[in-house]
Amino acid sequence: MGKNFRFIAIAGIILFIALSGCAQQTQQPPQSGNNDGTQTGNGETGAKIIEVTIKDFAYSPSQLAVNAGDTVKWTNLDSAPHTVTSDSGSELDSDQLNKGQSFSHTFAVAGTYDYHCAVHPSMKASVTVQ
């Protein structure tokens, strides 16, 4: 019984060490991001993805300041369809977004981009790119 006990104990220790090593190898590195909840891009440019929600027939936030190279992602949380449509020009021109659908746009040029919902024109917002 003494030899069997030692064998089982040694096998248990080896198994524990092996499993501990596997667990350490499979851990995911922390996601890149900022304390404000936005994700950074590839870590080289510092570009962010900024989330805008469409809820209760409003864009939130309705006024947004971003840097050139940042991406804004609009997600419709309403049961009604909405769009993200430029007031002038064609910079923003989403398809109709149903509940749960998103539209993203990366802003390359500084300026102020006013937009609205083509389905509900009283819904207005803007993005200022620095």
Image (spheres, grey):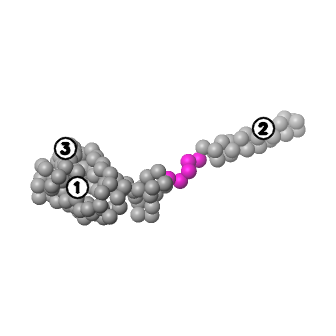
Label 3, residues with CA under 10 Å away: few <14, some 14-19, many ≥20: some
For the residues marked 1 and 3, what is the alpha-carbon distance in whole angstroms? 15 Å
Residue 29 is one of the magenta-drawn residues: yes
Front tag of 1 and 3: 3
For the residues marked 2 and 3, what is the alpha-carbon distance in whole angstroms? 61 Å
- If you read the primary sequence from the N terminus, does the residue marked by circle 2 or circle 3 appear first? 2
Mark 2 falls on what kind of element?
helix
Q: Which residue is mark 1?
A: 55
Q: Which residue is mark 2?
A: 11
Highlighted magenta segment, given as a residue range: 27-31
Mark 1 falls on what kind of element?
strand
For the residues marked 1 and 2, what is the alpha-carbon distance in whole angstroms? 58 Å
Give amino acid for label 3. Gln
Give amino acid for label 2. Ala
Q: Which residue is mark 3?
A: 96
User: Which residue lies at the image location 27% right of the left edge and 47% below the top edge?
Assistant: 103
User: Which residue lies at the image location 60% right of the left edge and 43% below the top edge?
Assistant: 26
- Residue 49 in percent (x, y) is at 37, 54
User: Which residue lies at the image location 11% right of the left edge and 55% below the top edge?
Assistant: 121
- If you read the primary sequence from the N terminus, does the residue marked by circle 1 or circle 2 appear first? 2
Residue 55 is one of the magenta-drawn residues: no
Label 1, residues with CA under 10 Å away: few <14, some 14-19, many ≥20: some
Left or right of 112? Residue 9 is right
